[in-house]
Amino acid sequence: MANLRTPGPIPLDDEILESLGTQMINHRGPEYKDLLFKTTEGLKKVFATKNDVYIITGSGTAAMEAAVVNTLSPGDKAINATVGVFGNRFGVICERYGVNLTTLEFPFGTDIDIAKLRACIEENPDVKAVMITHNETSTGVTNNIRVAAEVIKGEYDKLVLVDGISSVCSIPIETDVWDLDVVATASQKGWMLPPGLAFISFSDRAWQAHAESTMPRFYLDMAEYKRYFEIGQPPFTPSISCMFALSTALDRIEQEGLGSLYERHATIGQFTRDSIRGLGLDIFPEREEIASNTCTAVSIPDGVDGGALVTKMRTEHNVILAGGQAGLSGKIFRIGHMGLTSHSDIQETVDALKVVLPQVGFTKYR
Ligand SMILES: *Cc1c(COP(=O)(O)O)cnc(C)c1O
């Protein structure tokens, strides 16, 4: 079996794979109602929220799009604070829908500079919302969104829309305590699940924005999700198989406890970074304390052929790494360690890197 180290999807274990094979049920019947209510309760615990949480059949980007189309109107002003490729995607979604966007861009490998964020809101006092990414998977950087939200919401009272796709269920997040209006995440990241489901939390404040929003929407209209949830149904045919697996995963998360789950991610993240440095490589994020505990981005040193490295890791060692996206292509590779990643998964990756690196031009072993 391949050692799939992409930052989503992640390998699934037998219990989850078995749940996926459960026979179909009527999604408008009583069994589904129980499944929907039970899983929604479980999701709320992970989001740490009393707000509404909805399950969308779709990938994480569907939830990002839902965040935008349910709270903003064409012509509304908003700020997109981006530190990478996924942050940029939030901006593209806004622009496609006619949002009047100010882009607050930070260099790849850095996090949101809070002083610059504050200054940007000062300069644009009439923005309605600010978009932020909790964990930027393309650069392996985690933003301190608690502090960002204190500024956006606490000081300026703007809507906070969060891409938590690769953080929720892996890196601590407190939706209510931090006053986050919309948080989006997806099943194939930290949830130990296959791709197919997106989860989104929606605050009272987000609902007020929804009431004023004139954005066109149909499949992603949260009002439909709310209306149907009241009768214990999804608005559209859900991925019933993924829902069974979600129920299993949530039971396990409850058993393990969020504290232990977060600690496990922190430990594996640290172990990955230490092992990478042990090889003589450097992590891409500019500071250790902003390095992600779900995905490690590693700088490809001068003289090393990054494409060949990723290919050799796959063809000769059965380890599937992710390359860099967009402008980071050839500059970094990434190791995913969310969900059920074990130390031996990482050790195997590091051992293979040790063999492959000198074959692709690396000379500087520590
Ligand atoms: C994976 C990811 C996305 C995209 O999610 P899809 O499920 O591929 O649509 C967006 N943002 C972040 C931070 C991600 O990690």
Image (tube, rainbow, N blue to C red):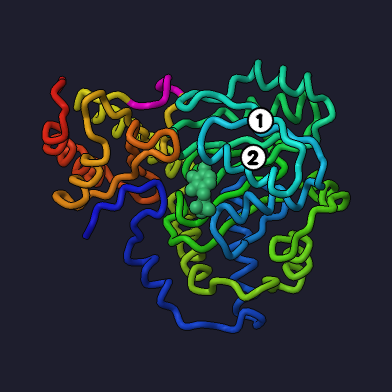
Q: Which mark is residue 67?
A: none
Q: Quadrant of the N terminus?
A: bottom left
Q: What span is in magenta?
A: 283-289
Number of labels in the image equals 2
Mark 1 in CB contact with mark 2 (< 8 angstroms): yes
Precedes in sequence: disc 1 or disc 2: 2
Name the chief secondary structure element in magenta: loop
Mark 2 surroundings: few (<14), some (14-19) or many (≥20) residues within 10 A: many
Q: Is residue 304 left or right of residue 46?
A: left
Residue depicted at 37% across the width and 72% down the height = 18
Q: Give SS at disc 1.
A: strand
Q: Position of residue 5 (x, y in %)?
A: 31, 47
Instruction: Answer with left or right where residue 363 lies relative to residue 79.
Output: left
Disc 1 residue type (three-letter):
Thr
Residue 318, visible in the rendered structure: yes
User: Which residue is labeled 2 in the image?
Assistant: 91
Q: Is residue 339 above or below residue 243?
A: above
Residue 103 — which label? 1
